Amino acid sequence: MVFYAVIDTNLLVSSLLKRDSIPAKILDLVISGIIVPLFNEEILEEYAEVLSRKEFGFSVEDIGKLLNFIVQNGLLLEKTAVWETLPDPDDAVFYEIVMSARKNRDAYLVTGNIRHFPTKNFVVTPREMLEIVLNCIDK
């Protein structure tokens, strides 16, 4: 079974900082092809900008490999207009992409900042996404 998900930037940062964390398990599911990342150019630009911050210390090579993997294995989408107001307007693109995807398939938005988005059953924490995947695999 394959799952489609918009991966919030905070999940990528957390997964790379702590390789034994729940966010890292989500990234492992992306790399294994169980979760297909959904993105647009704006999301890729945010990934690149945030992951390149000096305080994280990620190498240019590792960032490039991750972004290239997402481009090669993910699904590039156009965002769709949404009418909900989000606490942080910079997060709107993540919600707009998941809403675009949901026109044609089940899709999730996986974030460590759940309060930044509307309360919807498809806006989930990394732990919730892991449980969704594991419950489907166990069946």
Image (cartoon, rainbow, N blue to C red):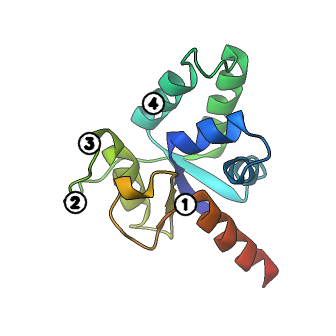
Judging by the rendered image, the residue that carries numbered circle 4 is 46
Query: Which mark's residue is nearer the viewer, 2 or 1?
Result: 1
Counting from the top left corner in percent of width and height, residue 84 is at 22, 60
The residue under label 3 is which amino acid type?
A: Pro
Query: Which residue shows up at 50% across the image and 46% down it?
Result: 8
The residue under label 2 is which amino acid type?
A: Glu
Judging by the rendered image, the residue that carries numbered circle 1 is 125
Query: Which residue shows up at 67% across the image and 32% down it?
Result: 66
Mark closer to the chain start, 3 or 4: 4
Measured in 3D between alpha carbons, the distance from the residue under mark 1 to the one under mark 4, in whole angstroms, is 20 Å
Which secondary structure lies at badge 3?
Answer: helix
Query: Which residue shows up at 74% across the image and 54% down it?
Result: 29
For residue 1, above or below residue 74: below
In depth, the one of 87 and 65 nearer the eye is 87
In depth, the one of 117 and 47 nearer the eye is 117
Query: Which mark's residue is nearer the viewer, 3 or 4?
Result: 3
Q: Which label was assigned to residue 34?
A: none
Judging by the rendered image, the residue that carries numbered circle 2 is 84
Counting from the top left corner in percent of width and height, residue 62 is at 72, 23
Measured in 3D between alpha carbons, the distance from the residue under mark 3 to the one under mark 4, in whole angstroms, is 13 Å
The residue under label 1 is which amino acid type?
A: Thr
In depth, the one of 71 and 12 nearer the eye is 12
For residue 21, above or below residue 50: below
| Residue sitting at the far bottom | 139
Q: Place residue 85 in its image quadrant.
A: bottom left
Quadrant of the image for the N terminus? bottom right
Measured in 3D between alpha carbons, the distance from the residue under mark 1 to the one under mark 3, in whole angstroms, is 19 Å
The residue under label 4 is which amino acid type?
A: Glu
Mark closer to the chain start, 1 or 3: 3
Judging by the rendered image, the residue that carries numbered circle 3 is 89
Tell me if 47 is positioned left or right of 20 in this view: left
In depth, the one of 30 and 91 nearer the eye is 91
